Amino acid sequence: MQAFEATNYYFDQAARRLDLSENIRTLLMTPDREVRVEVAIELDSGKIGNFIGYRVQHDNARGPYKGGLRYHPAVDQDEARSLASLMTWKTAVVDLPFGGAKGGVNCDPTKLSRGELERLTRKFIEKIHDMIGPDKDIPAPDMGTDAQVMAWIMNEYGKYEGFQPACVTGKPVEFHGSAGREAATGFGLAIVTREMLGRSNRTVAGTTFAIQGYGNVGSFTARFLGQMGGKIVAVSDAYGAIVNPEGLDLAELDRHVSVSHKVVGYKGGDAATNEQLLTMSVDVLIPAALGGVFDRDLARAVQAGLIVEAANGPTWPEADEVFVERGIPVVPDVLANAGGVVVSYFEWVQNLQHFRWPIEQVQREEERRLVDAFREIHDLAERKSVSLRTAAFMKAISRVGRAKILGGI
Ligand code: GLU
């Protein structure tokens, strides 16, 4: 099964319960537009680097297409399609006036110099500038891209269309970005986790967490959960995991990571494998790395009591079925990690109004939106006796379907 099929499986599970006609289902599943471009640049060595870039615009019934750009060796058309579709449902789950898109460039950004990354970004935007823009399609950071890449995008786009800071979100704060955007996904994750634990009269304080992935999302999630009194007992990255049943000292760990750029080697914990982290006995397991982590066998081996999906698409449908059978609740990606795009929306609004919000306002509004969305989805799941994922897709499909009907096809 490929990633887009997996997303459509989840879509179908919800669509069946909504009694959607076959035509409407096809209409909602099919991406509006898919673009594949060659991104050729001169490498520092003087050779030509040939890269392939993608942008998939899935649906814009509720507003301009919205979604990140990923620089990673696994980027391809199918992945972009799957993630674009997830963005349509994600923006609808948190009721933002956006549709869904995703894209990226197939490359290994860790092997490119800063100059090469800048040339790659500018060339990619040169190729797709006519399909993006503040009212058309607004990119943002995703795996392998950051605020600097977004700044280059804004600058490159401006060469064609003039000063339009709202053409991209996740920019540096001192370059038309929003306070709180960098931390937004991790902050949101912590809020949603707190709400979920609260439903069984538990608190973050005193709860143990294992986090797979210590990039932007994983590290901010750890920080906010730690601030709420949570005990982070294991974290990992592409090189391996570290575990400390007493709880990791996050400030020390961050100092270590800032020097060695990996979590392994940190002295305040024991080394472990990613597999050990994913199957350890812990209250909450948070996959915050690549998609497609949980297959059937791994799902059977998981010992956590709750899974909160920080990554996009970490759970294959076969694993999702096992989690449902085993009664392990999963807070799905489209709800759990929506804090990033929520604050992207605030950044877009601020850019359009040329007005800046203080961090307190950003976090207050982000929290309110996520708490409301969580309550809606959780209540729907209970009312209909379905999983949180199916409830989230049901809510999103209804909203997107309604917009399509109101706007006319
Ligand atoms: N890439 C992030 C996501 O998958 C953020 C998208 C955005 O802010 O547009 O949700």
Image (cartoon, rainbow, N blue to C red):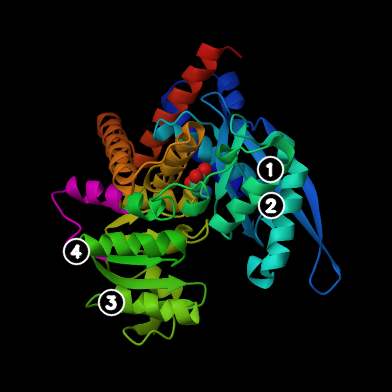
Question: Looking at the image, which residue is at 32% across and 79% down?
Answer: 252
| Badge 4 element | loop
Is residue 347 left or right of 137 when viewed as pictured?
Answer: left
Which of the two residues, 158 or 401, is positioned nearer the viewer here?
Answer: 158
Q: CA distance from mark 1 to mark 4?
A: 43 Å
Residue 184 position (above or below residue 160): below
Tell me the magenta residue range: 190-208
Name the residue carrying label 1.
157
| Badge 3 element | loop
Say whether marks 4 and 2 touch (CB < 8 Å): no
Which residue is at the far right?
47
Q: Position of residue 398 (x, y in %)?
A: 44, 23
Q: Looking at numbered disc 2 in the image, what kind of residue is underneath it?
A: Asp
Residue 16 position (above or below residue 325): above
Name the residue carrying label 3.
249
Q: CA distance from mark 3 to mark 1?
A: 42 Å
Name the residue carrying label 4.
229
Question: Looking at the image, which residue is at 73% across and 58% down?
Answer: 120
Q: Position of residue 139 (x, y in %)?
A: 59, 43
N-terminal of the two: label 3 or label 4?
4
Q: Looking at numbered disc 1 in the image, what kind of residue is underneath it?
A: Tyr
Name the residue carrying label 2.
76
